[in-house]
Image (cartoon, rainbow, N blue to C red):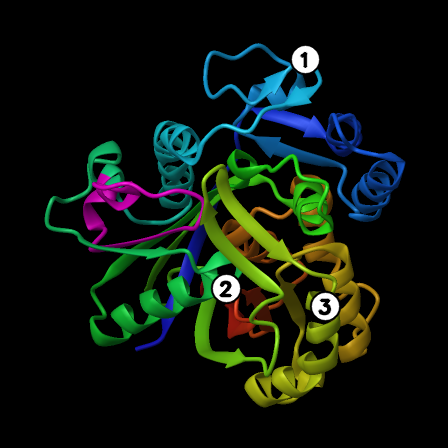
């Protein structure tokens, strides 16, 4: 039984901040010398991001009684426990908002959901987001729940793969997949290049998909196949670890170079004939990653436009980002019935996750 994404919903925090404002704030940190300030300016300006949404209004200069992350122009370094407490407060409403939007765009009521798959790498608690969705959306108390944690930016594809496996074994299953990441909670004030690059791209957001058995009554994206590939190197170049002052990102300049070097062989192996791909959904880990994929695969100039647009408007929302791109492709009237879609995402390891999808339009 083929599984189909029948709808995608998204949700964003209320606070929207410009890239230039975040750049100026980060560059103004005490102890940043001129070299560090130039690196901040270069990284933020080269990111191809205009705006980002964050759950911390203080980052936009607004007053807020929540997690204290700013004293004037000085960014504070709250302990990990305080950051995680803020995640526990702020994440469930975003999980729920994205899930409601996905349900509203589908033909299914909350009572029809049989399985929930939640995804996040920016916080943890139990009972977790999967449990809260049952309560917040009034889902059946018998719903099966799964949580994929700490997989990083690539996690939406494993979540969709799990949903497809569930539907493949039970054609009556209706799976709610929800990704929510609050990356802003883990900003570090370090002048280390890895932390500057991370601060220049990561943002907050949530996205959800309803996955059910394919039939002619529903528009959607058929989930045709999946593949995972671990690169020969990169284990130390992209990592996500728990520190005393938040989660700490390692993101070296080698990451785009490794992707650029290996993506052609990987994409050909897992996707087949690249010329047959009609649309691309590539996770925008950063502008340089998109540039490397674009160049290595010799793509048409417009092929990565959906990925670049999501990056421009929202930044890198980790696992949720790919679903934002698929949402836009699902809404694209120019994408014909039967169009082949290729999805690629990159996570710690360095791991490449891939999926092939087919655009399907409901029968008249």
Q: CA distance from mark 2 to mark 3?
A: 41 Å
Mark 2 Cα-neighbour bin, 10 Å: few <14, some 14–19, many ≥20:
some
Q: Are marks 3 and 1 in contact (CB under 8 Å)?
A: no
Residue annotated with mark 1: 72
When the figure is inspected, residue 141 is found, relative to residue 359, above or below; the finding is: above
**Residue, far left:** 142
Task: Give the foreground label among 2 and 1.
Answer: 1
Residue annotated with mark 2: 361
Q: Position of residue 283 (x, y in %)?
A: 62, 60
Quarter occupied by residue 168? bottom left
Left or right, 334 with reference to 247: right
Mark 2 vs 1, N-terminal side: 1
Q: CA distance from mark 3 to mark 1?
A: 35 Å
Question: Residue at position x 20%, y 55% from top?
Answer: 114
Residue annotated with mark 3: 254
Q: CA distance from mark 2 to mark 1?
A: 52 Å
Mark 3 vs 1, N-terminal side: 1
Task: Give the foreground label among 2 and 3.
Answer: 3
Mark 1 Cα-neighbour bin, 10 Å: few <14, some 14–19, many ≥20:
few
**Magenta highlight range:** 110-131
Mark 3 Cα-neighbour bin, 10 Å: few <14, some 14–19, many ≥20:
some
Q: In which quadrant of the rendered image does the N terminus lie? A: bottom left
When the figure is inspected, residue 22 is found, relative to residue 301, above or below; the finding is: above
Mark 2 vs 3, N-terminal side: 3
Q: Are marks 2 and 3 in contact (CB under 8 Å)?
A: no
Q: Position of residue 106 (x, y in %)?
A: 38, 49
Q: Nearer the viewer, residue 152 or 314?
A: 152
- Mark 1, secondary structure of its residue: loop
Q: Is residue 130 magenta?
A: yes
């Amino acid at each position: 039984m083929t599984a189909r994404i029948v709808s995608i919903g998204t949700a964003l925090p209320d606070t929207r901040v410009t890239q230039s404002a975040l750049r100026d704030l980060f560059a103004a940190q005490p102890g940043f010398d001129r070299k560090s300030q130039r690196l901040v300016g270069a990284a933020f300006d080269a990111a191809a991001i205009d705006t980002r949404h964050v759950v911390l209004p203080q980052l936009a200069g607004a007053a807020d009684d929540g997690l204290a992350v700013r004293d004037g122009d000085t960014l504070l370094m709250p302990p990990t426990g305080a950051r995680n407490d803020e995640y526990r407060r702020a994440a469930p409403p975003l999980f729920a908002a994205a899930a409601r939007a996905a349900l509203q765009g589908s033909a299914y009521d909350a009572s029809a959901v049989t399985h929930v798959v939640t995804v996040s790498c920016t916080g943890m608690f139990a009972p977790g987001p999967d449990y809260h969705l049952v309560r917040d959306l009034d889902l059946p108390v018998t719903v099966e729940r799964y949580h994929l944690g700490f997989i990083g930016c690539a996690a939406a594809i494993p979540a969709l793969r799990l949903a497809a496996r569930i539907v493949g074994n039970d054609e009556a299953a209706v799976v709610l997949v929800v990704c929510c990441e609050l990356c802003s909670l883990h900003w570090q004030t370090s002048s280390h290049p890895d932390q500057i690059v991370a601060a220049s791209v990561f943002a907050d957001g949530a996205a959800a998909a309803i996955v059910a058995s394919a039939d002619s009554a529903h528009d959607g994206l058929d989930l045709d196949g999946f593949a995972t590939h671990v690169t020969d190197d990169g284990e130390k170049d992209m990592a996500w670890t728990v520190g005393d002052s938040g989660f700490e990102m390692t993101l070296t300049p080698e990451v785009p170079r490794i992707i650029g070097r290996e993506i052609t062989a990987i994409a050909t192996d897992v996707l087949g004939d690249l010329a047959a791909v009609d649309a691309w959904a590539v996770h925008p880990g950063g502008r340089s990653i998109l540039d490397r994929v674009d160049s290595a695969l010799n793509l048409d100039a417009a092929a990565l436009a959906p990925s670049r647009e999501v990056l421009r408007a929202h930044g890198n929302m980790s696992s949720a980002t790919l679903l934002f791109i698929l949402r836009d492709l699902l809404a694209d009237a120019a994408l014909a019935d039967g169009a082949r879609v290729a999805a690629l995402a990159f996570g710690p390891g360095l791991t490449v996750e891939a999926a092939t999808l087919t655009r399907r339009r409901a029968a008249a």
